[in-house]
Amino acid sequence: MSLDRPPITAPAPLQAPDLPGEVRVESLDNGLEVCLLHNPQAPIVTCALWYRVGARDETPAEAGAAHFLEHMMFKGSASYGPGEIDRRTQALGGSNNAFTSHDSTAYYFNFSGDRWQEALAIEADRMRGLTLDPDEVDSERQVILEELSMYEDEPWDALEQQVHAALFPGHPFGRPVIGTRESLRGMGHDELASFHRRFYRPDNAVLVLAGDIPGDALERVAERFAAIPGGAEARPELEPVPVLEAWVRVERRAGDVARLCLATPAPDAHDPDYAALRLLVAVLSSGRASRLHRHLVEERQSCLWVAAQVAEAPTMGFLSIALEVVPGVEPAEVETEVSKALAELVERPPTAVELDRARRLLLADWVFAHERVHQQALAAGFALSLFDLGHTRRWLQRALDMTPAEVLAAARRFDLGRAGVIGWSLPEEEADGETDGAVADGEGAP
């Protein structure tokens, strides 16, 4: 007796998804870019306003200005007194927040579908100009200085900043987004007002409305923003990122466990091989079966955890690996194993099985990162403010389509084990007498 069996067919190629919902991108006459993402999966609306300004646009004397203004945006404008934005948001059952990076600054509100226009009123009011009351500026400066002290006392934050400073020496990307004590103490009403006037204009901004938005949403935006003049200053031209020719070591003493932060230069997100870089990082550290996790956490049990990530930025690129060492394990042994893992990306290139798993993890991460309307709004704003709306889907689809040979060719081109920064935060009893934050060039290459 014979059994009829269905023919074996190859699995369908993986496809990068589009943003959920219906997307429409328009521009007002004053240059404000407006993205309308209609997705009525829940009766809520997220309003996210992105400004194309961040720490990279500051002079050394202005270091921290974008982050300082992030605070001051909630401290008074023509129609909203100090603290009133937060009180109004809470009274309407919403939430708000903001964040600053080297490349951009974003402000967002989440409201129910019948109250979202309050976000437009707030954003338009503080785009026109801030009160920047000197007393409020002085008060918030102290808050930021305390925040800076907290970062300096937190082992990971302090170590990462020292590594970035060594990776981008003398460059804006190497300066902390929060600024320095010297720059913050020299920054008052006039300096903040000048920075706001130069960059916080409609022609330097992207406004995203996502969720259960009505059909006249664009008209509501125009009512609030069309009369605000453009005239933003062009972004300062960035000097070239310094090229490291050797490994640089950074060591500090803090905390109760040994922490490693290793960073190496890598292509920025415009590079055609950026997709390969994302695949290689997934092979290294995504999931329990990844090379670093399996070897350092599961098999050798020398690390408590390990993670790797790659920057998604338009003008700088780096790959970083972070881990915490199990007490009693020699940090130098762990460093050697990480070094071998980087070298083996070329010497023992990812197998078809590893790449298939990495592709599926990248795809799953995308889905999880775009589940909620709030996440969709931020994703659209990020893409439009720094790239274009299709940026993420393009590199993801490229990653899903790449062959093992293409990934290997990219890994050889990257040469990730050639140079970078090795940063250790060691418990005091493990320190070797170096001063806190000491840097040595060309020593201890992986």
Image (tube, rainbow, N blue to C red):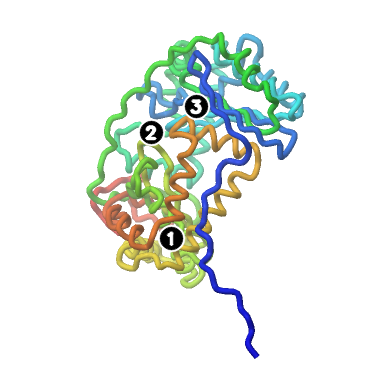
Q: Percent x, y for residue 125?
A: 60, 13
Determine whether the residue tagged by mark 3 lies in a helix, strand or loop: helix
Identity, as a three-letter code, of the amino acid under mark 2:
Arg
Q: Is residue 253 above or below residue 111?
A: below
- Asked whether residue 324 is in view, the answer is no
Identity, as a three-letter code, of the amino acid under mark 1:
Leu
| Residue at figure coordinates x 63%, y 12% from the top left | 223
| Residue at figure coordinates x 43%, y 46% from the top left | 395
Q: Percent x, y for residue 92?
A: 76, 25
Left of 259 or right of it: where is 222? right
Determine whether the residue tagged by mark 1 lies in a helix, strand or loop: helix
| Residue at figure coordinates x 49%, y 35% from the top left | 389
Locate residue 313: give its quadrant: top left
**Residue 126: which disc?**
none
Judge the density around disc 2: few (<14), some (14-19), many (≥20) Cα neighbours within 10 Å.
many
Residue for badge 3: 67
| Residue at figure coordinates x 76%, y 29% from the top left | 93
Judge the density around disc 1: few (<14), some (14-19), many (≥20) Cα neighbours within 10 Å.
many
Left of 121 or right of it: where is 177? left
Q: Earlier in the sequence, mark 1 or mark 2?
A: 2
Q: Say which of marks 1 and 3 sits in front.
A: 1
**Residue 175: which disc?**
2
- Between the residue at mark 3 and the residue at mark 2, the CA separation in whole angstroms equals 13 Å
Q: Earlier in the sequence, mark 1 or mark 3?
A: 3
**Residue 284: which disc?**
1
Task: Report the label total.
Answer: 3
State if disc 2 and disc 1 touch (CB < 8 Å).
Answer: no
Front-lying residue, 429 or 56: 56
Q: Percent x, y for residue 251?
A: 36, 50
